[in-house]
Image (spheres, helix red, strand yellow):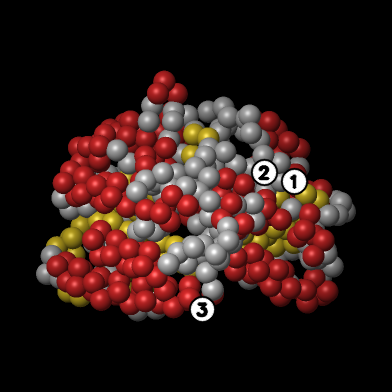
Amino acid sequence: MENTSQNTESLQQNNDIGQGRGVYISTYGCQMNVNDTERMYSLLEMQNFTPVEKPEDASLIIINSCSVREKPVHKVYSEVGTFRKMKEKNPSLKIGVGGCVGQQEKENLIKNQPMIDFVFGTDQIDNLPQLVAQSFEGEKRLINAKFEHRAPYHIETMVRNPGVATFVNITKGCDNFCTFCVVPYTRGREKSRPLQHILTDIRHLVKRGVKEVTLLGQNVNSYKGEEDIDFADLLAKVATETDVERIRFTTSHPKDFNQKLADTMAAHQNKVMEYIHLPFQSGNTRILEKMNRNYTREQYLEKIAMLKKTIPNVVFSTDIIVGFPGETEEEFQDTVTMVQEGGFETIFAFKYSPRPFTKAAKFEEQVDEEVKTDRLNRLFDAHDKMAFDLVKRYEGQTMQVLVENVDREHGKIQGRSTGNKLVHFLGTPDLIGKTVNVKITKAFPAVFRGELI
């Protein structure tokens, strides 16, 4: 693969910058951030840093941050503040901030928190070892948050201990410019990895014991490979040209979910899981237009109906924003009824939060915080009432569960069903990595209890 030969060469020149020092990475945000953290750890281990479980044991602390909502930005400043005493005791301690907050705030981070030694953006992760080396050599207030707009998206999946299930990036960035979303400004414009690079990565992961991969991107189903390869084509290739046992993907945009993709999922259900995360954000067409989502309420529900017809056992989850600027009580009720009509067993709902650079931050008619909180609570209450009823149908069913790890706290093992439900049941650790039949004895909206058959 043509991935990062230039980076690899410069890494070899600094192959002892860590000298066994401990590195601790604090991570919050989306699955992309989790995957980015794995990449950071891998790159830094190559430079002789040792991952540690507590920041107190580290000589290098990195905050891999999220800025999709307002509170995570505040969390960065708060977290850096908690490291103040550590830095006072150990002046050689280096603190860096990356992720979307690093990309968004840049100079402001170091200006507002002088304890921060370096800041790097989402497009500069592969240059992290050089940045860290410069910091340990005494350079201060380092910032590297440039976007590589013209460079092709060539990376290699780096996961230290991939386990049973792991992520594989296939796209990065986003071109949709939803008016509430900061991602195009913190992750850049959309790019897709070459098909063969993705297939090679998955084959390597399978050799390391991976049974399930989740294809990852901010808008994963807008994938555009060489020779007009689209996401449905990629999904079919992964299913037929690799030995991975299970395939998932996230996150999808409704406007790009077409009949071809649904047919491809149905044709490869032996490998492609029937779980779909399909954010609708608002159930009201006027609000959707203000959000620049490029579909109406009716069009979204038509997609849901099409998917249910094509994949009868399909399981949906969704993302929702309440209190978008100008949202009336009646428009909020459209969101509540959308949840009910869609039959979502799981929802991820949030209060609208103005983000820098976005159009919606400048909209008039910002909704009061108390109103947003009330609407969010009422949405969760409405969903809880239906979700518990929806999942009752699973009780007594036998499901195929891929065992992922041991839940030591409860003395059980756990894994995921094909419909992405976390299932707890009694068993032995030697089952990890195996797909077993489990009879469901108790079903909650997100977690099931069962008995091994």
358 sits left or right of 108 in the view: left
- Marks 1 and 3: CB-CB under 8 Å? no
Residues packed near mark 3 inside 10 Å, few (<14), some (14 to 19) or many (20 plus)? few
**N-terminal-most mark, 3 or 2:** 2
Which residue bears the numbered disc 2?
Answer: 124
Query: Is residue 287 positioned above or below 90 on the image?
Result: above
Q: Position of residue 230 (x, y in %)?
A: 37, 31
Q: Quadrant of the C terminus?
A: bottom left
**N-terminal-most mark, 1 or 3:** 1
Task: Count how many numbered circles sit on residues in the image.
Answer: 3
Q: Label 2's element?
A: loop
Q: Label 3's element?
A: helix
What amino acid does circle 2 point to? Gln
Q: Quadrant of residue 256?
A: top left
Point 54% across, 42% down: residue: 173
Point 64% across, 33% down: residue: 149
10 sits left or right of 186 in the view: right
Q: Nearer the viewer, mark 1 or mark 3?
A: 3
Q: Position of residue 73 (x, y in %)?
A: 64, 64
Point 57% across, 38% down: residue: 189
Which residue bears the numbered disc 1?
Answer: 144
Per the rendering, the mark at residue 387 is: none
- Marks 1 and 2: CB-CB under 8 Å? yes
What amino acid does circle 1 point to? Asn
The Cα atoms of the two marked residues, 1 and 3, are separated by 39 Å
Residue 164 shows in this picture: no
Q: Quadrant of residue 140?
A: bottom right
Front-most of residues 352 and 35 = 352
Q: Quadrant of residue 199?
A: top left
